[in-house]
Amino acid sequence: MPLRALDRSLRRVFVALLLWGVGFGLYNYLWPNFASSLGANGVELGLLFALQTLVNTVVALPGGWLADRFDRRRVILAGWWIAVPAAVLWALAGGWQALIPGILLYNGSNVLVPALQAYVAGRAPADRVASTFTLVFAASSLGPVLSPAIGGYIADRFGIRSVFWIAFVLFVASAVVLHGIAAVAPQAAAPATSGRVRRRVGLGDLMAASRAVWILSMLAGVVIGIDTLAWPFFPALLQARGGAGDVAIGWYGALVSLSAAVGVALSGRLGERLGASRTLAWAQGILAGATALIAGAPGQPAAVATSLALRGTLDGSRTLMTAQVGATVPPERIGRAFGVYNLVIGVTGAITPYVGGWLYQVAPSWPFWASVPLMVAVALLVPRALGRRRAAAVAV
């Protein structure tokens, strides 16, 4: 699906995500080592990763409620601006604990995610929800394709704090671009025709989401939980066991971003042609091999590059599963459905990085080896799980 097929607002969302991704990519793969340089050990690093996901989880339900009750454009813009100062706080941090306020702002801004997901799904053609969704959100992966290498070079020459200042400028530019998207009326989604209806669009209605959404959310939670058990630690692994410096990690990060962009772009097309279950099963099997490869040879550039080039299957899987939510529920409940989805994946994602931190403390490769058999199990179980989701969707 070509970019020109998107309407004007979705193209602006694409550009805003692209700019944000460039800024994010400048420091993302250096961030774990920056935290370590500020005194964080393996367990404390895992705690910071867990905190990021915990905050994402806390804002999931309010985000779903806001997405269906208010103009989604306003929700998106407010959340976008909340994250902008995070880069400044990190640039000024004097210890690893000082990174926490930036985490709270950056990840707290994810209150906008259900609104953004619903906005994109709502403007997508009914027969191309998955491909539109994956195309728009591919910008998040496309943005960091070259910026990690640039960030690594800047950090090596001028220090990583200068990288955060440049990211701040890009975040501001991204928010400005986003102001051009069209407004969306508060969803007929939240019709306030009676007190009974108002109660049903609240927390009770959210928790009573269709079985299809819960099944899909739990599957996504398992996949993402296994991912966050190991992969957030890959820069630290490459530094500790592979001797990689900031420049090398920057280039590796660029490869990860390129792989993610390709994986996300392909996932929508493959999902529509081969089916979501087959696409996800193959993706998890490939990811298991990539994880074993980096765990077994973190000091071999060819092995590391191959592993990171295959890691995009994870990003494709995550985006494809998210797109399935948009195709599962009616428009008036889509915000709350995304709220449930983000809540479930957040719960597992908040726990596993902390577990991974303890494993990393024992040996840097342990989180990766522990996740390999889990990925294989998911690859084998995905078709059956998604089959139940389809059956549940028919029954709703």
Image (cartoon, rainbow, N blue to C red):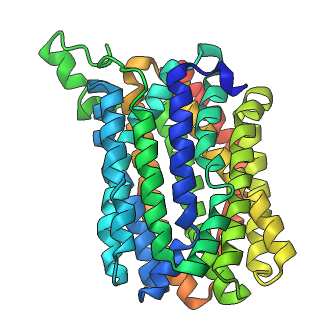
Which quadrant holds residue 237?
bottom right
Front residue of 322 and 217 = 322
Which quadrant holds residue 341?
top left
Where residue 286 appears, x then y in whole percent?
A: 79, 56
Front residue of 67 and 325 = 67
99 sits to left or right of 370: left
Determine the residue positioned at 66% across, 70% down: 250
Front residue of 70 and 64 = 70
Against 339, residue 180 (above or below) is above
Front residue of 140 and 233 = 140
Against 259, residue 340 (above or below) is above
Determine the residue positioned at 59% across, 31% down: 133
Determine the residue positioned at 68% across, 43% down: 264
Where residue 142 appears, x then y in whole percent?
A: 66, 47
* Residue with the most extreme top position: 193
User: Is residue 392 visible to us here?
Assistant: no
